[in-house]
Image: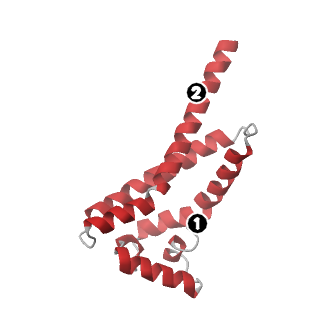
């Protein structure tokens, strides 16, 4: 995220990061990471760099803590999870319908993008299920 995707919105990066992106583009022909970048993709990457990445770190810390979660964590997880998951739909649609990649390149690129769909979707499901369980517990207690 910080080292690769941010290159679509920020112009200052170490040469190593630029080299990794160049190698990635040469190997997989990812049309989204090839300049000039589409405005909608830059908007997604701006959200990713400014909000999503920070909340991802918080979510990992909260989930690893094994303590009770603060009241805001469930709603924030649901918001984060649904937002990030839905941003992957147009991204995957572009990847799967472009003609610049072979089937193998599309498969590998999809595997690289998959964690950005799987973890947020799981977190949204977890937050929604936790909320439903909590509501059911409150109703049974009343």
**For residue 28, what is the image quadrant?**
bottom left
Numbered mark located on residue 132 in the image: 2
> What's the coloring here?
secondary structure
Q: Which mark is residue 49?
A: 1
Q: Secondary structure at mark 2?
A: helix
Give the crowd class for mark 2: few <14, some 14-19, many >=20 residues within 10 Å. Answer: few
Q: Nearer the viewer, residue 2 or 43?
A: 2
Residue at image coords 42%, 74%: 33
- Location of the C terminus by quadrant is top right
**In which quadrant of the rendered image does the N terminus lie?**
bottom right
Residue furthest to the bottom: 15
Q: Tell me if 32 is positioned left or right of 15 in this view.
A: left
Residue 62 at x, y percent in the picture: 70, 47
Marks 1/2: CA–CA distance: 31 Å
- Which residue does the image show at 56% across and 87% down from the upper left? 15
Task: Tell me residue 38's x, y (percent).
Answer: 39, 71
């Amino acid at each position: 995220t910080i080292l690769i995707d941010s290159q679509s919105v920020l112009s200052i990066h170490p040469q190593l990061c630029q080299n990794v992106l160049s190698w990635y583009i040469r190997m997989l022909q990812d049309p989204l990471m090839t300049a000039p970048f589409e405005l909608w993709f830059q908007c997604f990457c701006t959200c990713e760099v400014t909000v999503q990445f920070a909340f991802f770190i918080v979510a990992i810390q909260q989930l690893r803590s094994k303590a009770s979660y603060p009241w805001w964590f469930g709603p924030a997880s649901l918001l984060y999870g649904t937002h990030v998951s839905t941003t992957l739909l147009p991204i995957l649609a572009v990847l799967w319908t472009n003609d610049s990649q072979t089937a193998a390149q599309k498969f590998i690129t999809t595997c690289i993008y998959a964690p950005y769909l799987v973890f947020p979707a799981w977190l949204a499901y977890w937050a929604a299920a936790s909320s439903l369980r909590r509501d059911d517990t409150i109703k049974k207690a009343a």
